[in-house]
Amino acid sequence: MNSNNSQQNNKKTWSGRFTEPVSELVERYTASVPFDYRLAEYDIQGSLAHAKMLSIQGIISNSDQVAIEQGLTQIRDEIRNNEFTWQLALEDVHLNIEKRLTHLIGDAGKRLHTARSRNDQVATDIRLFLRASIDRILSLIKDLQYALLNLAEKHIDTVMPGFTHLQVAQPVLFSHHLMAYFAMLKRDTERLLDCRKRVNLLPLGAAALAGTSYPIDRHLVAKLLDFEGICENSLDAVSDRDFAIEFCASAALIMTHLSRLSEELILWMNPRFGFIELADRFCTGSSIMPQKKNPDVPELVRGKTGRVNGHLIALLTLMKGQPLAYNKDNQEDKEPLFDTVDTLIDTLRIYAEMLSGVTVHHNTMRQSALRGHATATDLADYLVKKDIPFRDAHEIVAKTVQFAEQKGCDLSDLPIHELQQFSDRIEADVLTVLTLEGSIKSRNHIGGTAPEQVMAALQKARQWLENEYIQPR
């Protein structure tokens, strides 16, 4: 960011009320251009629509509107080509662009700010930025869901131990496990789509806080900028950032879901599990231990989740004590919002690619599922079907498990005659119940881990992605 010393003593656009210039310390402390410059595209987009409306309403002349459009187009090209000089003395993105516009086209540039304030201007810019960011994030979530779906379809028959309390609980299909994260991301998509509706409302026209005396047409500006509606209370339009907070809450949930999956990838890659391998390009080594292959990417996803969660709390804290209407506090909304967007986009991009490079050790998964008495619940269910009350069946199986542990074998390894000493209801058909495949196949209902249910879930998920996924307007 460049600072032009010759501009330090320039007269501020608002300085008529003041008898002394702002100190250099205050100028630096209050300036937002070092970070809000990234709103430039959206600021220009909003200004073009505003100028067109002013011209149509007869508030400025057609010739002024044409000059404004030409000037803003040139400024946009300068910014895109990295030829624009940002000046700290001009405080923010809005005044930097306005100053350059006035330099290019003269008095016509000074008329652009008619019937608006920086308060409704910045609120509009942020909404335009966030709307575009949400659309990009939704596309990246879809890519990640495809990666999950593709991996699940490759391993439709792979058996793994399901866990509760990180202890072996019941056998499940690996594909079923992956589709749990697909379901989480589907809800994340729905939340973002719902959030987008509240983001996509136009605040421009609220001016500083009370509206404007000019005969503006807010619905026209909303149409030009593809907003679905307008913010209907001028005080609320310029002062609240709940739409940004709502987005950050949705982002925190997405990161939390990815953090959970990351924790599992890290565990599964550990030799004590040995369930998977991550591709080398997503890992790093140790500077001292040559054998190490560290899962840095999923570890950083865990770490960056705390960062995104922190931004949510920062925005909630920023807003909680503000009286109506706009306050300078709201300048602090942009950096946490920008970083949340950037972190989430980077994480989603790398995650989809990382999953495409996962190698699954299905034999290791299966052997792990054979340890830990994963079919104990199936034995209890078997006894219930033999007319034994569930609580009694539970106790019978618990004693059977204790016996197997004393023998140093899994429940499924016990021969029939040893099982029968715990209940005379046990017959030879129990062996099918105690197999991994028998256990999995028995969960044959919607949401269960039976192969036919998982296949149906995979098919439904792909259909949703390809045919029913709701694209933003």
Image (tube, helix red, strand yellow):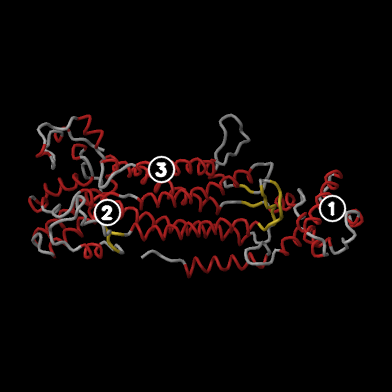
Badge 2: residue crowd in 10 Å (few <14, some 14–19, many ≥20) = many
Amino acid at the residue labelled 3: His
Using the image, tell me which numbered label, if any, was put on residue 413. 1
Q: Nearer the viewer, mark 2 or mark 3?
A: 2
Q: Nearer the viewer, mark 2 or mark 1?
A: 2
Quick check: 84 above or below 59? Answer: above
- Ranked by sequence position, the earlier of labels 2 and 1 is 2
Using the image, tell me which numbered label, if any, was put on residue 238. none
Mark 1 and mark 2 in contact (Cβ < 8 Å)?
no
Secondary structure of residue under mark 1: helix
- Residue at image location 50% in from the left, 44% down from the top: 301
The residue that label 2 is drawn on is: 237
The residue that label 3 is drawn on is: 311
Q: Is residue 44 visible?
A: yes
- Residue at image location 13% in from the left, 64% down from the top: 57
Quick check: 94 above or below 18? Answer: below
Amino acid at the residue labelled 1: Asp
Mark 3 and mark 2 in contact (Cβ < 8 Å)?
no
Residue 234 in the image: x percent, y percent? 24, 55
Amino acid at the residue labelled 2: Ala
Quadrant where the image shows the N terminus? top left
Secondary structure of residue under mark 3: helix
Q: Quadrant of residue 459?
A: bottom right
Q: Is residue 80 visible?
A: no
Residue 382 in the image: x percent, y percent? 80, 62
Quick check: 346 above or below 145? Answer: above
- Ranked by sequence position, the earlier of labels 2 and 3 is 2
Residue 119 in the image: x percent, y percent? 23, 49
Q: CA distance from mark 2 to mark 3?
A: 22 Å
Q: Give 36 or 270, whichever is nearer the viewer.
A: 36
Quadrant where the image shows the C terminus? bottom left
